Each structure stands twice: as structure tokens, then as C-alpha cells.
Amino acid sequence: MAFLRGLACASVWAMAGVAVVVDAAVAADAAVLDVPTPYIPSTRGNVDEMLRLAGVTPRDIVYDLGSGDGRIVIAAARDYGARGVGIEFDAALVKESSEQARKAGLSERVEFRHSDVFAANLSDATVVTMYLLTSLVRKLEPKLLAELKPGTRIVAHDYGFAEWEPDHKVQISKNYMLYIVPSRVAGAWRVETPMTQGREFVLDLQQKYQVVRGGVRVAGGFLPAFEARLSGERLRFVLVENDVSYRFEGEVRGDVMEGVVRYGIGPNLNEQKWRAQRMDVPRL
Ligand SMILES: C[S@@+](CC[C@H](N)C(=O)[O-])C[C@H]1O[C@@H](n2cnc3c(N)ncnc32)[C@H](O)[C@@H]1O
């Protein structure tokens, strides 16, 4: 127990941003062990970096998971005009958050729920913030991927996911990671484009989070998808046939992708619509 308490303590200091000399391996272990996430508030600067990295606007609903005294949700409403929800399992902190929101005149725009984050419904979030220990962040990953809409931005302060690489990362005194929930694109899609010309065009994609690979099966051949990028619902890739590059950009909406494809030589490219329909059950 003393060993565990020691590890928890190292994490607490690390979260507080206080310079302490701890063995790196011990600190790393502490971050992944099942140690409860303590209450260590983000500073005003930390809060602003998180909201800035998420690109919060008045159209957003910002959820802070483990919302402490409510400062992230209150700042999202006060400084960025968003609406917000705080989820916190410490009843005293929930009470304090609601009181702070009332004093700031923001009770109409923010809400604090006394709940475990695993029991909370997060599906209407457009932005999720978290300052939680790695063990909790890792456990939350499947819930976040299953519940959040594609395009939802997740910002993690200091502790990120195990295998999911951030879409963007900044280091400004502390580390902040931005993850954009990707659409599910893995599998086979029947494509109609100006390239198809009556041929069956099957776009076959493999996906690990936002990293996408694959290409098009056509008439016994294969056209690799170059420069494939997925950001939320937006997918782009380049196919090359007969030395002409076809630059696809589109949006994924469930079982349909739609967008424009540009092709030709020089700056004035031809532009036409393309569409793809899912042929199989989605996989991630
Ligand atoms: C490091 S503090 C961060 C507080 C606030 N988000 C901030 O950045 O200022 C983590 C908070 O998460 C809360 N917490 C930890 N595990 C939780 C869980 N499973 N459900 C809800 N809240 C949790 C803790 O009570 C604590 O208030």
C-alpha cells in the first residue's frame, strides 16, 4: 500500500506541474497503474491552451470529464461563448462548480452532473476535455470512440491515449494533445466517379484510428490510395491512372461518402462530384 501511495503521490506532483525528481520508470508506472485520478486543477493558462487547441466556438458543447471545480466548462462558456457540461464524481466539487457558474451568471449555459464519467452519456459533446491519469484515459478510449460523433475534438492535458496518436500536439509549459474522432471508413465502398466509366470501382480501406490505407480494385488491377488522410468526417486521397492524378476529397456520412474529385494538369483542374456507398458492415 505504501508503495502505491508513493506512486500516487508522484503522479499528483507531476499533475501539479511541480518540478520533482522522480525516477522516470516509476513515474511512467504510476501513470498507467490503476491509481484514482486526484483533484488537481488546471491553471487558468492550462485551461485556455486546451480550449484554444480544441478551437472552441459558440456552436460547441464542451464536456469536461472529471470537471473538478468547473473551471474548464465555465471558461468555455465565459470566454468562448460555448455551452458546457461538467462530469464529476465528487459531490462537493459539483456543488462548488454550480455555485461558481451561478456567480458568473452562466447557469443557463453550463451544467454540472454528479456522476462517474463511465456512467455519463457524452453523445451530444462536440468537444471533450480531460485532465485525468493515463489509466483512466486508456479505459475511457472505447467509450469515447463508441459514443462521440465523428469530428468531435478531444483535448487531453498531459496524459493521452496509449496507441491513438494525436492529430495535433502542442507543448506550451505542459503537453496538450488533440484527437479528432474519426469516421468509420474501414471496409469496401462502391465508388462512382468520372474515372469509373462503367467499370466496377471498389475502394478498399484499412483503418487504425485516423490512419487510413488502401486503394481501389478495378478490372483485375489495383490503384493505391496515396496521401490518404482522415480528419473526423473528412477523407481525402489521390488515385493515379494513366499518369493522371485524381485528387479525391469528401465527407463520410454513415454508409455514404460524397465529395469532389479534381484532375488534370496545371492549376486549372477539372472538378467533378464523386460518391461511394458502403458494401459491407463497418469495421474500425
Ligand atoms: C486532475 S483533476 C482535473 C479537474 C479539472 N478538469 C481541471 O482540469 O481543472 C481530475 C478530476 O477528475 C475527477 N474524477 C476522477 N475520476 C473520475 C471519475 N471516474 N468520474 C468522475 N470524475 C472523476 C476527480 O475528482 C478530479 O476532480
Image (spheres, rainbow, N blue to C red):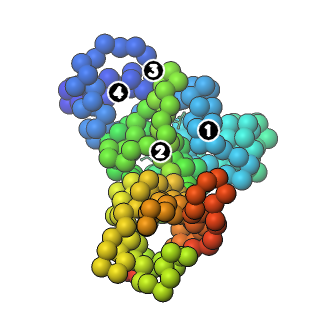
In which quarter of the view is residue 10 placed? Answer: top left
Q: How far apart are marks 1 and 3 (CA)?
A: 19 Å
How far from the left and from the top, in percent, is residue 61?
65, 53
Q: Position of residue 275 (x, y in %)?
A: 55, 76
Tell me the CA gap for discs 4 and 2. 25 Å
Residue at image point 37% right, 48% down: 164
State the SS at label 4.
Answer: helix
Q: Quadrant of the C terminus?
A: bottom left
Residue under label 2, please give it. Answer: 167
Mark with earlier residue (3, 4):
4
* Cα–Cα span, label 3 and label 2: 24 Å
**Disc 3 designates what residue?**
17
Pointer 3 or 2: first along the chain: 3
Quadrant location of residue 12? top left
SS class, disc 2: loop
Q: Residue 51 carries which label?
A: 1
Label placed on residue 11: 4
Q: Which label sits in the foreground, 3 or 2?
A: 2
Q: Which of 57 and 122 is in front in this view?
A: 57
Counting residues from the start of the chain, the first of labels 4 and 1 encountered is 4
Q: Which of marks 4 and 1 is in front?
A: 1
Q: Residues within 10 Å of mark 2 (few under 14, many from 20)?
A: some
How many neighbours does mark 1 have within 10 angstroms: few (below 14), some (14-19), or many (20 or more)? many
Q: Mark 4: which amino acid?
A: Ser
Q: Which amino acid does label 2 sit on?
A: Asp
The numbered mark, 4 or 2, whose residue comes first in the sequence reads: 4
Amino acid residing under circle 1: Leu
